[in-house]
Amino acid sequence: MTEPLKIAPADKANILSQALPYIRKFHGKTMVIKYGGNAMTEPALQAAFAEDVVMLKLVGINPVVVHGGGPQIESALKRLGKTGHFIQGMRVTDSETMEVVEWVLAGEVQQDIVGLINQAGGKAVGLTGRDGAFIRAQKLKMADHKDPSIMHDIGQVGDILSIDPSVVKALQDDAFIPVISPIGYGDQNESYNINADVVASKLASVLKAEKLMLLTNTPGVLDKQGQLLTNLSAREIDALFADGTISGGMLPKISGALDAAKSGVNSVHIVDGRVPHAMLLEILTDTPYGTMIRSH
């Protein structure tokens, strides 16, 4: 269980005074939030996240939540006696696994998040890519890392063709908070499992969001000495890819963030979701609580 932050009254007043210019600056703007990691599994962090989202909505900012659910899917598959299989880090999603993905993400996980936000005083509505013909996708074609002439079949894993944000905008206009499961649909009405970081990044670009917030289980982007890099340009991120500073599991996450930054999202934030209210502190105070990637 994560302990709540203990803040002296004077410090609370200082934080509130810092928030005013940011509230004024971001009023009416859209912020896309990728919700995952410890923030999604620890009860205290879940409650803090829901409170942060409602707080943003109440001060006139428009949050849009995109959630993951890898651990929950893995747990459900184990209960069914099914072993997950991965190729190059991607879950092979056959038709049976896709059924599990849909009921876990669009059912259990999504509705838990909707309930938490509603309990905190917000009005959340769950969506998948099918709702309002929201996310059209096709089968992801994945080439082998070592031999690009070899293509791996990983089943119903999707590559986004288009996003129609009409349903999200309609919900925002009516003061609802959209909570989106990363499931798309194809031309033959088939379902596709899509990486949640990719959905969040693409959606932020389509919505012309002010910010994309990615909650992770790391402090942010670290240099080779393990020190947090709090402020990076898209060009600097490219250099960190080139010299190997960013590698492994952070590659797809940062790649999506970089695409969003280059596609018009003003800033992307990699935020440590293990810190209570880190997202709110990052947005509404002067103190950095992660890595900000700027578009320029």
Image: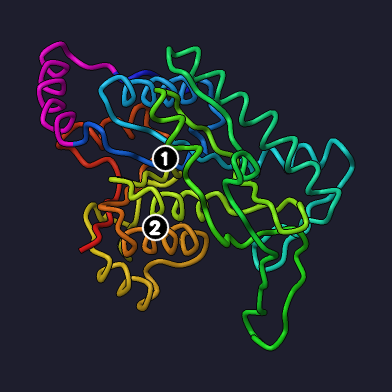
Q: Nearer the viewer, residue 164 or 39?
A: 164
Find the magenta span and give its range: 6-25
Q: How is the image coloured?
A: rainbow
Q: Say few, some or many: other residues with alpha carbon within 10 Å of mark 2 (under 14 / 14 to 19 / 20 or more).
A: many
- Classify residue 10 as left or right of residue 259: left
| SS majority, magenta | helix
Residue at the spot 25% in from the left edge and 71% down from the top edge: 235
* Residue 25 versus residue 86 in the image, above or below: above
Q: Nearer the viewer, residue 188 or 67?
A: 188
The quarter of the image holding the C terminus is bottom left
Q: Nearer the viewer, residue 267 or 204?
A: 204
Residue at the spot 69% in from the left edge and 59% down from the top edge: 157
Q: Position of residue 78 (x, y in %)?
A: 82, 41
Q: Position of residue 252 (x, y in %)?
A: 50, 62
**Label 1 sits on what residue type?**
Ile
Q: Secondary structure at mark 1?
A: strand
* Residue 56 versus residue 88 in the image, above or below: above
* Residue 86 versus residue 172 in the image, above or below: below
Q: Position of residue 135 (x, y in %)?
A: 58, 50
Q: Say few, some or many: other residues with alpha carbon within 10 Å of mark 1 (under 14 / 14 to 19 / 20 or more).
A: many
Q: Secondary structure at mark 2?
A: helix
**Label 2 sits on what residue type?**
Ala
Disc assigned to residue 211: none
Q: Circle 2 is placed at which residue position?
A: 257
Q: Circle 1 is placed at which residue position?
A: 33
Outermost residue on the right side: it is 81
